[in-house]
Each structure stands twice: as C-alpha cells, then as structure tokens.
Image: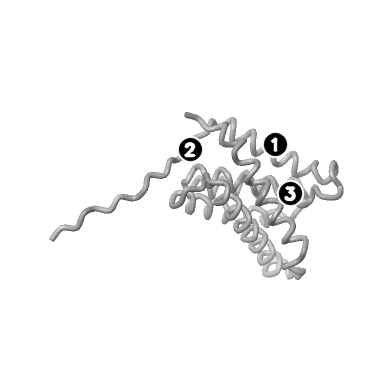
C-alpha cells in the first residue's frame, strides 16, 4: 500500500538587493550608536541591529546566510559601541541562525507572529549575551529585571512597526 505524499506548505523566500541589506545594517548600527545620545531616556531600550538581524533571518530563510549576517552585524556592533568584541557577535549569530531556521517552517508575515517572535528572540538574544558575560568574563548581573521586560516589549512592538516598512524593500 502506497501512502499519498504529504506536501509541505510553500513558504516564499524573499530576496533583497545587496544594497538594501547593507543600507539597513548601516542605518541600524548608526542609530544604535547615536540614539542613546539623542534620546537619553529611552534610546537604550531599542536594539535596532537585533531587529535587522531578525528581519533578514526570518525573510531569507537560509540558516547559513542568517548565521553569517548575524555574526557580521554583531561584531560590527561590538566594535562600534565599545562592547567586548564577540559578545553581540555570538548573540546575533544564534538569533540569525534561529530566525532563518524558523522562518522556513512557519509564516512569519503576520503581525502577531512578528510580535511574539520579536519578543522571544529578544529574550534569547539577551540570555545568550548574559550567559556569555557570566561564563567568559565572570561578570554577574541581574537578568530578569523591569528593564529587560520593557525592552522586550518595546523591541517586539518595534518589530511589528518596522518589518512592514522593510517588506517594501523586497526584490520581486
């Protein structure tokens, strides 16, 4: 007896001009450096390089590209913001890989999915950063704080608002 083949739902892989990706990364990193200076009470809550990594990871749906993009963005962020080289690189590498792997399996274009994934991946990002700080540097700090919860909510909401704007930059 032959069972009928199950077909997986086709999830579209979105393509972008290389200049769009480079421009989004540049803008996110520039704002990451200058936003806390422009908005002293609130600019530090937003993690724009994380959101760019998450968006392109979810959209491209290629784990290798997501991993490499996350690594590059994270290392550039480490260098530009004065953090120890490698901490953001590690966190964004995992986020890029995870988002690309998950983006190929579920529909991530729905605003509710983007809200939930933005929050969950932000917590993952911050958790990896915290574990790396503790294990590699011996620096211990409080993790589950009001700051983390507020930053998670704000970045998840920003993902819902920012991702449709980035959707318009897709190559057809």
| Extreme-left residue of the structure | 1
Lower sequence index among marks 3 and 2: 2
The residue tagged 1 is 27
Residue at x 65%, y 39% (from the top left corner)? 25
Dot 1 falls on a residue whose secondary structure is helix
**85 to 33, vertically: above or below:** below
- What's the CA distance linking mark 3 and mark 2? 25 Å
Q: Position of residue 18 (x, y in %)?
A: 55, 32
Mark 3 neighbour density, 10 Å: few (under 14) some (14–19) many (20 or more): many
Dot 2 falls on a residue whose secondary structure is loop
Q: Nearer the viewer, residue 103 or 64?
A: 103
User: CB under 8 Å between callouts 1 and 2?
Assistant: no
Q: Looking at the rendering, which quadrant does residue 83 occupy?
A: bottom right
Which circle, 1 or 2, is nearer the viewer? 2
Q: Position of residue 115 (x, y in %)?
A: 61, 51
Q: Nearer the viewer, residue 79 or 171?
A: 171
Mark 1 neighbour density, 10 Å: few (under 14) some (14–19) many (20 or more): some
Q: Position of residue 157 (x, y in %)?
A: 67, 49
Q: Position of residue 75 (x, y in %)?
A: 66, 49
Name the image quarter holding the N terminus. bottom left
Residue at x 51%, y 48% (from the top left corner)? 108
* Label disc, if present, on residue 46 of the rendered structure: 3
Lower sequence index among marks 1 and 3: 1
Q: Nearer the viewer, residue 130 or 85?
A: 130
- Horizontal side of residue 81 vs 114, given as left or right: right
Which circle, 1 or 3, is nearer the viewer? 3
Lower sequence index among marks 1 and 2: 2
Dot 3 falls on a residue whose secondary structure is loop
The residue tagged 2 is 14
- What's the CA distance linking mark 1 and mark 3? 13 Å
Residue at x 73%, y 61% (from the top left corner)? 148
């Amino acid at each position: 007896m032959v069972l009928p083949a199950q077909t997986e739902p086709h999830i579209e892989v979105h393509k972008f001009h290389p200049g769009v990706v480079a421009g989004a990364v540049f803008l996110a990193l520039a704002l990451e450096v200058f936003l806390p200076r422009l908005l002293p009470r609130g600019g530090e809550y937003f993690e724009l390089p994380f959101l760019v990594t998450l968006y392109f990871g979810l959209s491209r749906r290629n784990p290798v590209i997501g991993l490499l993009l996350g690594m590059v963005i994270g290392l550039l962020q480490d260098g530009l913001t004065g953090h120890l080289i490698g901490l953001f690189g590690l966190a964004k590498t995992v986020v890029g890989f995870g988002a690309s792997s998950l983006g190929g399996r579920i529909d991530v274009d729905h605003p509710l999915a983007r809200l939930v994934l933005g929050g969950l991946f932000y917590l993952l990002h911050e958790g990896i950063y915290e574990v790396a700080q503790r294990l590699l540097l011996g620096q211990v700090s409080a993790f589950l704080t009001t700051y983390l919860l507020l930053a998670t909510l704000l970045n998840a909401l920003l993902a819902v608002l920012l991702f449709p704007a980035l959707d318009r930059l897709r190559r057809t």
